[in-house]
Image (cartoon, helix red, strand yellow):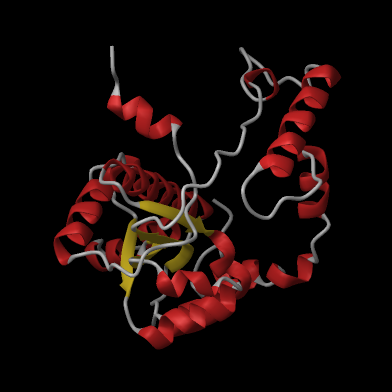
Amino acid sequence: MANPTLDTLLNHRSIRRFTAEKLTATEVTTLVDAAQHAPTSTFSQQYSIISITDPQQLATLGDITGHHWLEKAGHFFLFLADQYRNAQLAPKTSTTTANLHSTDKLLAGIFDASIAAEAMVVAGESLGLGSTIMGSILNDAAQVISLCQLPPLTFPVFGLAMGHPAEQPEQKPRLPQSLMHFTNHYQPLASAADLASYDQTVADYYQSRGTHQRAETFSHHIAAELSRDPQQRAKLAQVLQAQGFLNSLP
């Protein structure tokens, strides 16, 4: 039996080249509506979304991320962990203050934003749109906070560039389930053969795809990612603290 939802999920590709067509106001409203209907921790809805439409702000985000193609997307959404709104709703007591500033509530905001973004991605793909989630805004989280005038108890988690695709890239092969799906307890790398096979699959993908071919395995990719200069995002904890998070133990 045909299952369009599974078809959409299993055919996901990140899109980084878009046509010049901007999303309509109706499309934006529909996408935000889809995001809002995603699950949310304790129904507290601890996230917000900002549509970035100002060309100068988009150019600055292009500088921060190093990906100026975001400026050509049909729309750019910024997803925030947000306890500021709930701080305005709750009575000011020592308990509510401690909770709002806690690691627990920071994580809840990140969960809510992430789940909402995935719902928006799937909704967009069902409408024929494409997108890329952009964690690279964290290259300078403090500048993003200043750029978007974010209040305390909010934090930019990632951006989402979305629009009408001008490309249909090959789909990147995922890990075999033997290396990431376990029963009852965590398993170290189950099989060197499974990893070697996946490394070859990834190498074949990079060699055969239509653009940016290169010699790379998954193992090499992970080694390269973990070899990046950690100083680029070394101040994230300080920025979080400046926004009012991670200042108490719970």
Work out whether 127 lies above or below 241: above
The residue lying at 44 percent from left, 46 percent from top is 111
Residue 216 lies in what quarter of the image? top right
Image quadrant in which the N terminus is located? top left
- Residue 64 location, x and y as percent? 58, 77
The residue lying at 79 percent from left, 25 percent from top is 195
Work out whether 42 lies above or below 105: above
Work out whether 27 lies above or below 139: above
For the residue pair 175 and 158, the one nearer the viewer reads as 175
Residue 22 lies in what quarter of the image? bottom left
The residue lying at 45 percent from left, 39 percent from top is 12
- Residue 73 location, x and y as percent? 39, 67
Q: Indicate left or right for 107 with 37 as reference.
A: right
- Residue 166 location, x and y as percent? 42, 58
Residue 11 lies in what quarter of the image? top left
Q: Indicate left or right for 94 with 239 as reference.
A: left
Q: Indicate left or right for 155 with 25 as reference.
A: right
Residue 82 seen in this snapshot: yes
